[in-house]
Amino acid sequence: MGVELQKQNIVLILIDTLILKKIVKKRERGIVLPYPIFRGNIYAMPNDRLLSTYDRQTVILSNEAVAEAHYLLRCECAEIAQHAHPGQFVHVMISQDTGMLLRRPFTIYTVEGREITMLYQIIGEGTKRLSEMPKDAPLHVLGPLGNTFDFTVKPEPAILVGGGAGIASLMLLAVALRENDIQTLGLVGAQRCARLLSVKDLESIDIEVHIATDDGSIGHHGYVTDILADLLENTAWQRPTVYACGPHGMLSAVAKITADFEVPTQIAMENRMGCAMGVCLGCVCPVRIDTNTIEYQRVCTEGPVFNASDIAWDV
């Protein structure tokens, strides 16, 4: 583990202690917290996961536009590339001289030898500045972070559903599925043709791609979930499994559709994050533990991958 990460761990422990003290004080004063605090588990990332997490300074090898308002960034992070698994992400310090104190989370799009890529959308000031950073500009990259997709029970077939930049979270999974000779379909949605992502990358590894656009400029005129519902209704598969990432509304629709067809579904959540190591509690989402119990879990550590049926979509 690098010295930088050890220092960061010490800081996180101190922050963790302060948060815990505040919670205890609120409870002592009789203040009701807005949600359960993980059944008392307010610790940062588990130690076993920290052992394969690295904070590295690197430089941008390339940073190119691949669609309207979307860029693909490539950098060398050998340890992160070696330990990355489908669904995991990195936390990036865009530039220390911009005044932006918080890192930004980006899913690991591809791994090629010692290099990783990040496919991202310009959303705010941080990603706008990132898109303007040239080759050889410095970056601090922390990762890999989060849990992973699971396909230990072989899907027949695997159906990937990506909405907008959400498809980025599914590319490593797509490669892993094909390396294991699993039939895979890719359902890719976008607002319009100019924002369509990853189709050629998916087709290059022999994945059958179905496209939907909101404006009908290419593919199905409508939502990508329309294609999913149609395929599940009209195709006799033995054991389909759905993996999805995209906007919250799309994921909620996917969860409802697959529940109706009793198809197991894993989703990658894309909540905003502060620390990305389980301390700040800024990325929590409601998870149904049983019929009467909802627990707020951290997307950065308990996730980003969850079973769709476990998320309390109506909360």
Image (cartoon, helix red, strand yellow):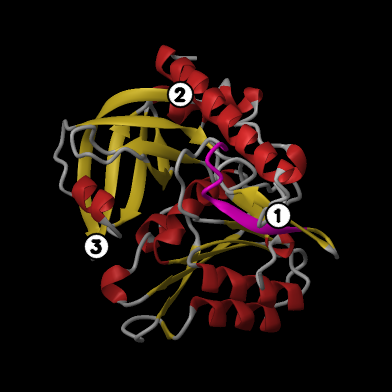
Front residue (pair 136, 100): 100
Q: Residue 15 appears at what percent x and percent y? A: 52, 29
Q: Name the residue under label 1.
A: 32
Name the residue at the right extreme: 291
* Tag 2 secondary structure: strand
CA neighbours of label 2 inside 10 A, class few (<14), some (14 to 19), many (20+): many
Residue positioned 21% across, 55% down in the render: 65
Q: Residue 141 carries which label?
A: none
Highlighted range, magenta: 278-288
Marks 2/3 in contact by CB < 8 Å: the verdict is no
Q: Earlier in the sequence, mark 3 or mark 1?
A: 1
**Mark 3 vs mark 1, CA separation in Å:** 43 Å
One can see residue 112 in this view: yes
Q: Which mark is residue 69?
A: 3
Q: Mark 2 points at which residue?
A: 54
Q: What residue type is labelled 3?
A: Ala
* Tag 3 secondary structure: loop
Find out whether residue 281 is within the magenta segment: yes
Q: Is residue 289 left or right of residue 123?
A: right
Q: Is residue 286 left or right of residue 4?
A: right
In the image, which is nearer the foreground, mark 3 or mark 1? Answer: 1
Q: Which amino acid does label 2 sit on?
A: Tyr
One can see residue 109 in this view: no
Compared with residue 137, is residue 105 higher up or lower down, i.e. above or below?
Answer: below
Q: Is residue 86 left or right of residue 126?
A: right
Q: Residue 281 appears at what percent x and percent y? A: 56, 45
